[in-house]
Image: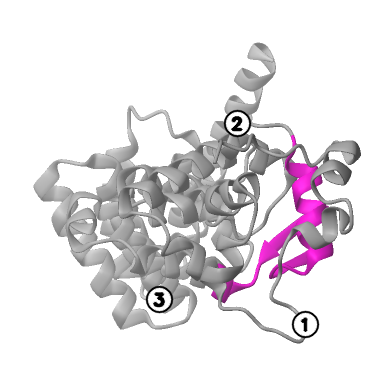
Amino acid sequence: MGHRPPVDLTNPGEWRRRHPKTGPRAALRTGIGPIHLPAHEVLEQQLPDVREFLLRTFGLREMTPSICDYLRRADDSKAILHCLLDSCLSVFNLGNGRLHYHHLFRDFLRHQLTASEEEKAHRRAAAYCRRSGEDEEAIYHLLRARAFEEAVHILDQVSRSVVRAGRPNTIANWISRLPPEILEEHPAILAHLGDIARLHSRFDEAVGWYRQAETRSRARNDAAALSRALRGQARVYLDTVKPTQAEHLLQEALRLSDGQEDRVTRVRLLELMAENQLNRGRLQRAEMLRSQARDLREEGLEEHEEHA
């Protein structure tokens, strides 16, 4: 039997020629109806191009034509998605042009691939998500691909905004998927765990994470991570109104920030120090620190306008 070329789902004439009695909808065998076929039989009965589509896009939690085209290096994904949706092939419409597979069917598709093929697919999906600004989806795919170093890099960039959005558990879920050796190499991740515990008012646990981060940061001579760990501990003492314990931590964190380009962190440290001085009843000292923070922030705004 000769090789059958891939079908063009966008060409109605091609569908009619191959499926004169059924059309595109029935050409996608579904197993939905009086006879419910096992998933492997459903997959085997699809045309080669449909099978290829399913196996290339298995890892997506949400599918759009653009990301499917990117993964497949093709331009017909919109038509295929439309036909899959019409066929009820374990595909559901999320609205706004996004679809997803039933989780059991997606798991089945995943098991049709080798570990190497699965990781390659997730890496490619992560590349698309990074390019399109979908950092959280990129982290998901990088973790699935076991690309932990890359995942940590993005996690550290987005953690502040995710926490501010009131979703600290999202950070905790990502971190739970990291192997211990990655936590050893990235003490700042331990500080994230401290932040999550502190936001849930688990202050003793938070201090424990921050101190682990401090110890490992000192061992690695990582000034930025050390400053973060000290700042986290100080925030616990600010939250629990223990200004004496907070003061030396904030002072060391401020010293570590000297010469670093992270102006936002330095401004925040000055503000925390001002808050701590208020807790100690030192109003003049607090106002001086607030003034320094304000001047530094305005200086940064002026530099931004000059380079705009």
Residue 282 appears in view: yes
The residue closer to the viewer here, 34 or 223, is 34
On the image, the x and y values in percent for residue 144 come to 40, 57
Which residue is most to the left? 219
Badge 3: residue crowd in 10 Å (few <14, some 14–19, many ≥20): many
Q: Is residue 58 above or below residue 199?
A: above
The numbered mark, 3 or 1, whose residue comes first in the sequence reads: 1
The amino acid beneath tag 2 is Arg
On the image, the x and y values in percent for residue 57 come to 58, 51
| Marks 3, 2: nearer the viewer | 2
The numbered mark, 2 or 1, whose residue comes first in the sequence reads: 1
Q: Is residue 87 left or right of residue 300?
A: right
Quadrant where the N terminus is found in the figure: top right
- Spatial CA distance of label 3 from label 1 is 50 Å
The amino acid beneath tag 3 is Ala
Q: Would you name the residue on which mark 3 appears?
A: 197
| Circle 1 SS class | loop
Q: Would you name the residue on which mark 1 appears?
A: 33
Which residue is most to the top? 306
Q: Would you name the residue on which mark 2 appears?
A: 73
| Circle 3 SS class | helix
Q: Which residue shows up at 54% across the image and 32% down it? A: 296
Quadrant where the C terminus is found in the figure: top right
Badge 1: residue crowd in 10 Å (few <14, some 14–19, many ≥20): few
Residue 94 colored magenta? Answer: yes
On the image, the x and y values in percent for residue 249 come to 28, 57
The residue closer to the viewer here, 275 or 72, is 72
